[in-house]
Amino acid sequence: MGLLIAAAIARRNVLPHGGLYPDEAWQAFGAAKGSLSNLLTVGFSAPGFTGVLMVWHRLVGAPEQMAYLPFVAGLLTPAVSYVVLRRIGTAWSVSVLLGAALASERLNVIYSGRVKSYVIDALIVLGFAVVLPRLVRVRFSWRAAALWVVGSSAVGFFSPFALIASAVAGMILLVRASGDRAVRAAAVVGQGVLLAVVTAAVRRTYDVKALETWWKRNYDGFIRLDGQPLRDVVHIETHMRRVAGVFSGGPIWWASLTLIVVMVTLGVDAIVRRGSSRAVRAQYLLVLMLVAVVANMVGALPFGPTSIGMRLSLWLVP
């Protein structure tokens, strides 16, 4: 309850009153004036989020009030983080500290009042980290496989980040199969086909190359590889440190230390505790980071941009 109150106080002035920022007004306008027939077009790269906004607009009516959706997500994330940390055995003091840090994190507060999916994306990743250990232990029937295809694809349709989070979850389910690999393989392949079709359809509605160039030129959103191993490692570390900096704040050395501690801890959990829920969760988060880096290297996804564009790193906060 304390974390909910702290999050509410931190966010009390972020909701728009009487207008929207230009770069979110087009998304609100698309949701207000669009329909299911042109959802892919008006939804840009996040048609699922736009679809949710369409439903919300039909219920509420005022475009400015679309910001209440990310507001609620931003309000819940610190408390959900605390609950998750406690359930996996983290000390009470550490859980409160991390939850409070997330409640007051600047970008998380700002984008809790914007008609953007960034804060909700972080909650989706956190949700997968929670449910995956349970799903791994489930013996998949064809009914469960069908439910996974529909559910994971619906989540992946929400935004590019949710798509990656959903796809990586499918990978972990398949790798951790035990006696039901054929059924899980069919489920993951079905999920992959649906997500690939949606991705291909969405990418036809805007100039992907122009957007990539914009993020590269303005926010250094892509890792620059020049064939020099040491330089390449430095470039990768720089972008990963920026991701850590979103959550930790403070000086560069603090973000670097946070990154090292997180990666080492996840690595230990993934290898040493192989059969545990902590191992599944750690493997998921490590693979998620790896896929994000690889997707960045092939020009498919900005990763670890400069401080101005750090909102794109919020989904990796978990």
Image: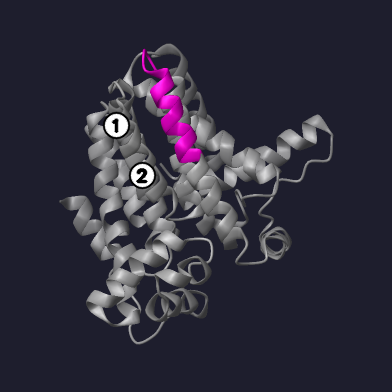
Q: Is residue 282 visible?
A: yes
Check the picture and name the quadrant holding the C terminus. top left
Foreground pick, 12 / 173: 173
Q: Is residue 252 visible?
A: no
In the image, is 3 to the left or to the right of 235?
Answer: left
Q: CA distance from mark 1 to mark 2?
A: 10 Å
What residue sits 25% from the left and 26% below the top? 89
In the image, is 201 to the left or to the right of 79?
Answer: right
Q: Closer to the N terminus: mark 1 or mark 2?
A: 1
Q: Determine if the magenta segment contains residue 150.
A: no
Rendered view: 287 above or below 165: above
- Helix, strand or loop at disc 1? helix
What residue sits 32% from the left and 58% below the top? 74
Q: Main secondary structure of the magenta part?
A: helix
Q: Any mark on residue 308, and which?
A: none
- Colour scheme in the image? one colour
**Which amino acid type is shown beneath numbered disc 1?**
Ala
Rendered view: 107 above or below 172: below
- Helix, strand or loop at disc 2? helix
* Residue at the farthest bottom position: 18
First to last magenta residue range: 177-192
Q: Give percent across and percent down for residue 19.
A: 39, 85
- Which residue position holds label 2? 150
Q: Any mark on residue 144, and which?
A: 1
